[in-house]
Amino acid sequence: MCGAVLTLPLYKLPLWHYATRMTMRELDVRLALHKTEVRRILEKEPSSLVVDELGLFEGKYRIDVAVINGKLHGYEIKSRMDNLDRLPTQQESYSRIFDRMTLVADERHVAKAVEIVPPWWGLIAVSTKDGAPHLNEIWPSRQNLNVEPHALCQLLWRDEALQVLKDLGLATGSIRSRSRKLMWKVLAKVLEPDELKLTVHRVLKAREGWRTNDWSSSN
């Protein structure tokens, strides 16, 4: 896959665990997404970082797949065995952070899902073909014009936020000992939105400690 590395957070459990805890349908959709949509992105932009189950809002939510390059693109999976009960609150939260979002939904969910997600979200319908998931893009995602700076800052760990403040010459004695929440507020206030996006994306791509896993090699 063009030498790019797919990454998983440290809490990610072994693949066999998900084969038993998740429905195989959901696992198969995730693998199919990596082998098609994500692979195309990596072929076009090999330096992209792909993270499964990225924690958001201090772990309150986890986006199924996040792609980080010049944009922050999230993918939310709704398999046949899922329901859409949480989608309204998920879309509200994800829309505060991601530049682009795509819903990857089983075909039985599509009619209801389009009434829930904003028009700028992309939509990929999942059907079954020859016993395997078949992904069909109904429409692509568009640019989100309402990313919230403070919500975006919350992707940064405390030491990362502090380092950004140091680079800006803003890490005064009082700031150094304060909470990450205060640091997020300061960064959201002092950085212009485009500069903040670039900064957060750069820090996430440079973050060490991701556990790697090549989903493209899974059968």
Image (cartoon, helix red, strand yellow):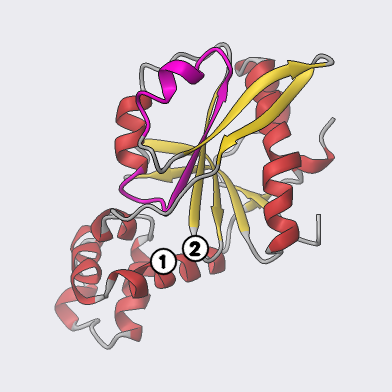
Q: Does the stretch in magenta take in 114? A: yes
Q: Residue at x 24, y 81 (%)?
A: 171
> Which residue does the numbered mark 2 point to in the structure image?
204
- The circle drawn on residue 136 is none
Kind of residue at badge 2: Leu
Calculate the distance from the C-alpha at mark 2 to the C-alpha at mark 1.
Answer: 6 Å
| Residue 17 in view here | no
Q: Are marks 2 and 1 in contact (CB under 8 Å)?
A: yes
Kind of residue at badge 1: Val
- Residue 48 lies, in percent from the top left, at 63, 61
> Which residue does the numbered mark 1 point to in the structure image?
200
- Residue 29 lies, in percent from the top left, at 67, 27
Taking depth in this image into account, of 150 and 55 the one nearest to the observer is 150
- Tell me the magenta residue range: 95-117
- Residue 141 lies, in percent from the top left, at 50, 45
Q: Is mark 2 on a helix, strand or loop?
A: helix
Dividing the image into 4 quarters, which one contains the C terminus?
A: top right
Quadrant in the picture for residue 13: top right
Against 20, residue 196 (above or below) is below
Residue sticking out furthest to the bottom:
169
